[in-house]
Amino acid sequence: MLTHCPRCQSSFEANKVIGDSAICHCGWSGRITTGKRKSSFGFNQNNFKSKKKMSTKSLVHFGIAALATLGFSYGAKEWGGNMMEGAFYVVKGSVKLNSASDEFRMAVICHKLEKQDCKEVSLARAYKLDPKNVNLTGEYAISLTEGGKHDQAILAFQKFFSQSEGTPRHKQKFAESLGEKEYYNDAKEWYYKAIIEAPENLEIAESMMNMLSKAHQYGEAMSIIGHFNMVIPKTQKLWHNLTVNLKKEFKDYQEKYAIKEMTVSKLGNYFFAPGILGGAMDTQLFIVNPEAVYTTVDMNYLKTNGIPFESKGKITVQPTNGAEISGTRIIIPRMVFGAWELKNVEAVACDNCAFMAGKSILSQLTVQTSQVTNTRVNILSMKEK
């Protein structure tokens, strides 16, 4: 008779043994006796085939019920409010009766209990039992991404998307795995698909910005921040630290490397690009508007930050939205737009004006428009002199 588990070598306690079978905390289960003996369930194994004896199906059900009682008491601490369901799962698994739906249900419980390893294992088992189930394939792929198994996740997502359109969550997780493997262009395509389908999902947008930061594509990351700051104002406060960190990373990067081009995206009505006025320490997000005749800046910002400028008198202009604004025509001796230093930039400064890059800035750059999925992007570069 076995007195210790053959897998982990721990001793079998009384509450872990039923008849001649045992279930160990490590997951091992099996018989602890060898040879033929009288069953603890009250029938002789030599007469098992007797018509009056219990059928195989009844025996299995009886054994499951008995072992579930054991699992109930053993799993109380581990499974919390799901202890009965967890007990039946463990017992059915020990006699290989769990179905794909059983495994999936356990994955859901593991997710609620924040047990990532348990969730991943259950989904892997479910997928193995029913590999043609499209929904199951999608959930399995997500679990692989969350478990850091990105090569496997990419293959699983490719299979999934060949059969299903998927949800924004599927697209986000696929993009995350692509980004982790440095397939940045492919990752951007799937991120944009997810954002277009879920335009108020800040988790997707934040995930994409983190990926763009890793790829050193700071301009595009900040253009996304500009869009969300405009359409969902609470992100100005919510993403304050993220924005500050991105601006600092961008500034450090451009001081080390010569940037030839920068991509900015248009998720809503506008493109956004970073700009630094004069010797300011802070980076502003400018609306990029090739149709605007004038570049506009906030006069209060110039004065508060001591930005040098030359005044050229009062002026009234009509931006592209049709409303007239009155301000001061100015010349900014030096500014950085995108990654390039510009000199003697003409602009209109007014109280509380939006920062908008018009022709006085964009005429010095080459602007190429292209499409990524359903999202327009502008690729900015400095004109050759």
Image (spheres, helix red, strand yellow):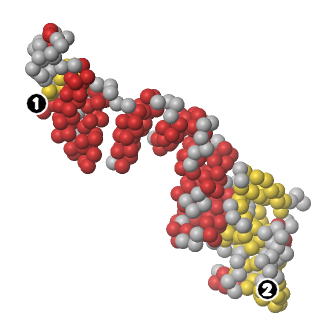
Q: Residue at x 71, y 59 (%)?
A: 265
Q: Residue at x 64, y 42 (%)?
A: 183
- Residue 14 seen in the figure: yes
Task: Classify 10 Å Cα crowding around label 1: few (below 14), some (14-19), many (20 and above).
Answer: few
Q: State the CA–CA distance, disc 1 to disc 2.
A: 87 Å
Q: Is residue 127 left or right of residue 367?
A: left
Q: Nearer the viewer, residue 67 or 222?
A: 67
What is the residue that sits farthest to the front in this orientation? Answer: 51
Circle 2: residue type:
Glu
Is residue 366 placed above or below 330 in the rendered structure?
above
Image location of residue 211, percent across then percent down? 59, 51
- Residue 236 seen in the figure: no
- Image quadrant in which the N terminus is located: top left
Residue occupied by mark 1: 14
Q: Secondary structure at mark 2?
A: loop
Circle 1: residue type:
Ala
Residue occupied by mark 2: 324
Q: Residue at x 64, y 56 (%)?
A: 196
Image location of residue 151, percent across then percent down? 55, 35
Give whichever of discs 1 and 2 has the lower sequence position. 1
Q: Nearer the viewer, residue 315 or 309?
A: 315
Q: Is residue 162 left or right of residue 169?
A: right
